């Protein structure tokens, strides 16, 4: 077989038992459909297996929650999943990863790809993916994120990043939607917003930049984060931006979304921080979660939002000089959004 599926630990205790989560329960249907897409003989599975002495083992001392005790209901593979494994190979394992699994996979002489699904992304899925990658370095290893769940959503994402770094292909991720909304008179602020959106996309998000008056309301409502931007006029945001914030913004369901802000100006000391502060204050009024990385991301430090100064008035400035900062801000904002909402 050229491509096989490995179903990792789809056992009751990890779904709705001792270590179950709502995220694990949510993927059961996806895993079932995934198994059905493979020939029965191309499906492998693992079963986490412990015994009565679990709490005295190293794992039990570090995770003192009895689970998957051999013969218990929690140890069993979910009934509707197990019914699809009647022709598959099931590897019993007493640790996070199965050393028997890659040996079983090696019996497929023409093997080109191993796809993994199951639980938990940040423990047994990542362990088995990396063991297989080490044992079969020329075989493609992939993980369908829509068929996996971690101990927490944040740990799920972290594990996906770890596997991606080790050349495991991650599929099935539906990107978060993020929006950038700005007023722009000369085009500089819109350009800065596009740079932010580009950075968001580099971090894996689906991001779009809109000028006020040209907003895709459905996309913004579906977005989990919104960055607002304005040019500076007399140390204030534009009148059109202020008017939109008091009217159109109210229809976009901004409460609960991650919020950020940026500004552009003609002069270095033209009032950009005042505009950013005003935008962030408005976001707080609308119930948004205001973003700042502070200095936690290292250099360059972008405390409350990026600023761009056009070169029209000061020869030593120019918007292109700030492209990197706007893009980097977009990346950081998107990473925070993933950490919060996935």
Image (spheres, grey):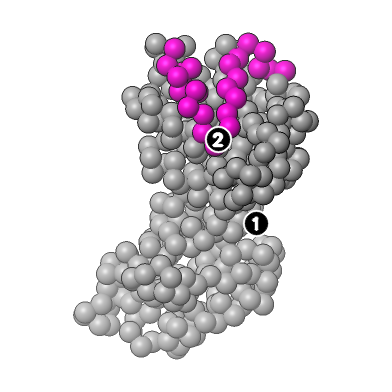
Residue at horizontal 37 percent and vertical 24 percent from the top: 136
Q: In the rendering, at what x and y percent does residue 311 appear?
A: 27, 76
Disc 1 residue crowd, few under 14, some 14–19, many 20+, Cα 10 Å: some
User: Is any atom of residue 107 visible in this view?
Assistant: yes
In this rendering, position of residue 269 left or right of residue 273: left
Question: Marks 2 and 1: which is nearer the front?
Answer: 2
Q: Nearer the viewer, residue 160 or 224?
A: 160
Residue 296, relative to residue 124: is it above or below? below
In this rendering, position of residue 18 left or right of residue 264: right
Residue 95 belongs to the span the image colors magenta: yes
Residue 61, relative to residue 11: is it above or below? below
Q: In terms of secondary structure, where does tag 2 sit?
A: loop
Q: In the rendering, at what x and y percent does residue 61 appear?
A: 61, 49
Residue 108 belongs to the span the image colors magenta: no
Q: Which residues are magenta?
A: 83-107
Disc 2 residue crowd, few under 14, some 14–19, many 20+, Cα 10 Å: some
Which numbered dot is residue 95?
2
Q: In the rendering, at what x and y percent does residue 159 appear?
A: 50, 45
Residue 76, relative to residue 205: is it above or below? above
Name the image quarter holding residue 313. bottom left
| Residue beneath disc 1 | 221
Name the image quarter holding residue 282. bottom right
User: Is any atom of residue 28 visible in this view?
Assistant: no
């Amino acid at each position: 077989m050229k491509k096989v599926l490995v179903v990792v630990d789809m056992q009751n205790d990890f779904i709705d038992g001792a270590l179950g989560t709502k995220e694990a329960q949510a993927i059961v249907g996806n895993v079932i459909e995934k198994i059905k897409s493979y020939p029965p003989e191309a499906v492998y599975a693992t079963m986490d297996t412990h015994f009565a002495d679990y709490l005295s083992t190293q794992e039990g001392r570090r995770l003192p929650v009895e689970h998957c005790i051999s013969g218990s209901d929690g140890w069993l593979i979910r009934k509707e999943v197990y019914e699809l494994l009647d022709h598959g190979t099931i590897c019993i394992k007493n640790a996070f990863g199965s050393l028997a699994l890659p040996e079983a996979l090696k019996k497929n002489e023409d093997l080109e790809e191993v796809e993994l699904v199951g639980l938990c992304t940040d423990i047994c899925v990542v362990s088995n993916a990396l063991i297989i990658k080490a044992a079969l370095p020329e075989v493609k290893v992939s993980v369908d994120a829509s068929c996996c769940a971690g101990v927490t959503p944040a740990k799920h994402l972290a594990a996906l990043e770890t596997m991606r770094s080790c050349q495991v292909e991650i599929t099935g991720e539906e990107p978060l939607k993020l929006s950038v909304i700005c007023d722009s008179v000369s085009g500089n602020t819109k350009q800065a917003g596009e740079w932010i959106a580009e950075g968001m996309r580099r971090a894996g998000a689906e991001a779009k930049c809109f000028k006020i008056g040209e907003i895709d309301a459905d996309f913004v409502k579906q977005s989990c984060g919104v960055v607002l931007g304005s040019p500076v006029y007399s140390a204030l945001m534009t009148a059109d931006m202020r008017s939109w914030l008091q009217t159109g913004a109210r229809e976009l369901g901004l409460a609960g979304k991650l919020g950020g802000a940026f500004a552009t100006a003609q002069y270095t000391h033209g009032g950009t921080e005042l505009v950013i502060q005003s935008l962030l204050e408005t976001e707080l009024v609308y119930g948004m979660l205001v973003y700042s990385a502070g200095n936690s991301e290292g250099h360059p430090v972008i405390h409350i939002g990026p600023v761009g100064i056009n070169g029209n008035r000061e020869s030593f400035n120019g918007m292109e000089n700030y492209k990197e900062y706007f893009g980097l801000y977009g990346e950081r904002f998107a990473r925070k959004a993933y950490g919060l909402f996935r």
